[in-house]
Image (cartoon, helix red, strand yellow):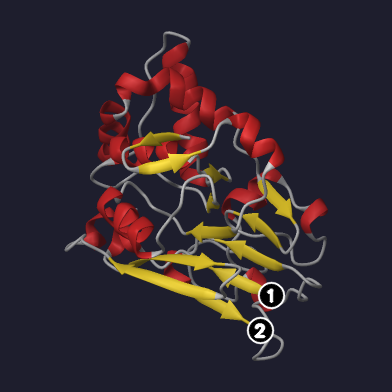
Amino acid sequence: MLVIDGYDTRSPEEEQRLPYERTIFIGDIHGCAAEFEETLDAVVFRGGRDRLLLTGDAFTRGPDPMRVWELIGATRADMVLGNHDDRQLRQLREHAAGNEPRFKHDNQRQTFDRLASVAAQLLAWLEQRPLYIEAEGFVLVHAGIHPEKGLYGTTRDEFLTIRTWPPADGIDGRRWHDVIAPMRDRTLVFGHDAPGGLVMRRTEEHLPPWLLGLDSGCIYGGSLSAWIMEEQRLVQTNSRQADGSRWWR
């Protein structure tokens, strides 16, 4: 096995034939690399034995997107595309085409500049991120799914940005998951909704959650949340972003 930055990772050939022992989900990181690394230590991440899945929005706004990128490579993490990743993808495509990317906020340009040395690799990686990951026991999305049409009736924009239902401007209102029916024998894992905080719902106390929202606002001074599916265990790392509210745009 190859060891990168202290984490064991198995080769692609090994990944094809060996099952994972644990499935670990981590909420929106937003460039908070120190909290990401601390969370990996807290869950005792084991390269080649644990599968790491991220809810999206990995790089933007936070202080150290390059270290986040390095840790994603070291752990072979997979991720669904988030709305911030989608915007970043468009910027990287513009850059690759020889055009000047458009930035709505200064923090977007800062993230882009900090990742400039790996722009080509990051573009190729983001191009391959799916809108959802479906496997035995779970479905992972970034923002959510259409509460009436379900997973396969959800549009690309809804996967990336859905929050309130019915859809409304702003962040206040009834959430899409307030009106959705529980999935049978699966946990629906999502991120995106930092204002809504951690969400965990069960049909019965002894059963795994059927709904799990893991964006607990690390970039805004909250925490970075992880869920170990096989252990039914939540792990949270306190944010180091003392003035996270300044990123709220």
In front of the other: 72 or 165: 72
Say which residue label 2 marks: 202
206 relative position to 104: left or right = right
Residue 59 appears in the figure: no
Based on the displayed image, in which of its 4 quarters is residue 43 positioned? bottom left
**Residue 66, percent across and down?**
30, 35
- Crowd class of label 1 (few under 14; some 14 to 19; many from 20; radius 10 Å): many
Q: Relative to 144, does residue 15 appear above or below in the rendering?
A: above
Can you name the residue that lies furthest to the left here? 242
Say which residue label 1 marks: 210
Distance between mark 1 and mark 2 Cα atoms = 6 Å
Can you name the residue that lies furthest to the bottom here? 205
Residue at x-position 56% and y-position 31%: 11
**Residue 209, percent across and down?**
64, 77
Residue 164 appears in the figure: yes
Residue at x-position 35% and y-position 60%: 39
Q: Relative to 84, does residue 123 appear above or below in the rendering?
A: above
Based on the displayed image, in which of its 4 quarters is residue 221 positioned? bottom left
In front of the other: 34 or 155: 34
CB contact under 8 Å: marks 1 and 2? yes
